Amino acid sequence: MQTLLSWGDQGWLDDIFRGVLVTVQLALATLPVGLLLGFLVALAKQSAEPTLRIAGSVYTTIFRGLPELLTLFLIYFGVALPIFTYLFPGASDQVTSFIAGMIALSLVFSSYASEVFLSAFRAIPRGQYEGGYSVGLSNGQTMRLVVLPQLVRIALPGLSNLWLILLKDTALVSAIGLADILRQTQIAARVTKEAFLFFGFACLVYLVLAIISSYGIGQIEKAVGRQDMAK
Amino acid sequence: MSTVSEIDVDRPPVIARPWTGARIAGTIAVGCWILIGIGLIAYLVNAWNPELFNRYAPLYMRGLWVTIRLVFISIVLGALLSIPIAYARMSDNRLLGAIAYGYVYFFRGTPLLAQTFLVYYGLGSFRPELEAVGLWWFFRDEWYCAIFAFALNTAAYQAEILRGAIESVPRGQWEGAASLGLHKFQTLRKIILPQALIVALRPYGNEIILMIKGSAIVALITVFDLMGETRRAYSRSFDFQTYIWAALIYLTIVEVLRNIVDWIERIITRHLIR
């Protein structure tokens, strides 16, 4: 067991570590796209304009209703694979899978994030906007300087939950061949026939990632809270 | 003195809604969705293939039935299992609490796919031992393994839902019941649970929906649920519409379920609306 989990040619630790890097990269690449998309969809859903609200609801209904794995396959076989084979035939399958995973996870993440942002928007009283306008701030300035700082604090617990879900959802990309944690442990398990050891190890790695994330989130929450206290 | 005739009094003119930036953006966005919808229908009509449909429609229905059975059995088993876990989580016994916390943390902190692999492939490593205790028939079968992994997973989530709901009922309710001489179990059954389940309904509904969506991953351990049948149909026909049909079926189920939960919630919270 020690040689199996050692670093180098004999063991699989280095391979699994490369998988960890891929998983973390994928999650980190998805996060900003998903946050931005989710914020825009939330803006649309809380707007006074009915057409925008409808468009936003359709978006969340679709991407919250589809199984994540199916969304991934739809994007992979329906969008990423055709585009990459026709436009960039030289691209490696890892790049294709990574992009497909990123798009699919962003769609899923953003549809959930939009709900979190939406309820945060609703928690901010109208007076905050009116106060902003009354001191002569423009629409954009009110949003950026008055509403957003409060919004972030209210939305943070919900968003950190979504981040943990995102970390777990990245495991699905192993199904389209991206060499993430689960894929690498799968290969190791198949070669060594030590499936329980390696899949158990994969679970531990995910747990460690979750614990690290919880610690980081705690730090962010502290920082955001402290800023608030200073005012 | 002439009276103003009715004809002279006009309604104020309706102010035309201005074409603001938001309205333009919204119209474009809705237009995009409509175009996508039309495109999808056009694609499905265009790609309509009676042979394909006749061949795979019964398989899809069978897969759907497998999905529903899998989710139903796992949810029920998980619900049973979640009761002792929630109890341990809330107990004053440190050891019990720690074990339950570890259980919940593990199953909520790791991907369901990894857990399923751990059960299906991982427990296969213990074949001699499992054969010795006569459980190999269970862990050899991907269907049982899927149910096993899913039930354990959903039990962790349901235990947290149950705990949250029970703790959402104020302490005074317990104390009031105790002062009336109700036994602890009676209190739970007659006072606490009726109030807690109202709180728990929406999370439970979400959990069922999450399980339906999550159950798609059993296709990766060769269970032929709806997703499994879809993958098989695609790998044989290379026709992308196979995935579109699956997406439509999943969307329909989830939407129907969501509306049912909304409806139940409206009914059981009728007395709370002022």
Image (cartoon, coloured by chain):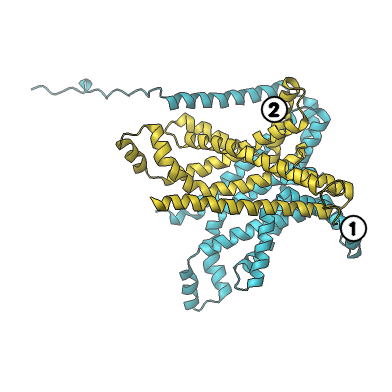
Mark 1 and mark 2: span between their CA atoms?
42 Å
Badge 1: how crowded within 10 Å, few (<14), some, or many (20+)? some
**What's the residue at 72%, 52% (across, down)?**
A205
A147 vs B77, nearest the viewer = A147
Find residue B255 and report its image quarter: top right
Q: Could you tell me which chain the residue with mark 1 belongs to?
A: B
Residue that label 1 marks: B127
How many labels, in total? 2
Three-letter code, disc 2: Val
Against A46, residue A9 (above or below) is below
Task: Report the disc number at residue B206.
Answer: none
- Mark 1 falls on what kind of element? helix
A12 vs A106, nearest the viewer = A12
* Residue that sits furthest to the front in the current view: A8
- Give x and y (percent) for residue A202: 76, 51
A114 vs A95, nearest the viewer = A95
**CB under 8 Å between callouts 1 and 2?**
no
Which chain is assigned yellow?
A: A
- Give x and y (percent) for residue B75: 68, 55
A106 vs B171, nearest the viewer = A106
Q: Report the quarter where the N terminus of chain A lies.
A: bottom right
Residue that label 2 marks: A79
Against B153, residue A176 (above or below) is above
- Give x and y (percent) for residue A200: 78, 55
Three-letter code, disc 1: Arg
- Give x and y (percent) for residue A45: 48, 36
Which chain is assigned cyan?
A: B
- Mark 2 falls on what kind of element? helix
Asked if residue B103 lies left or right of residue A90, the reply is left
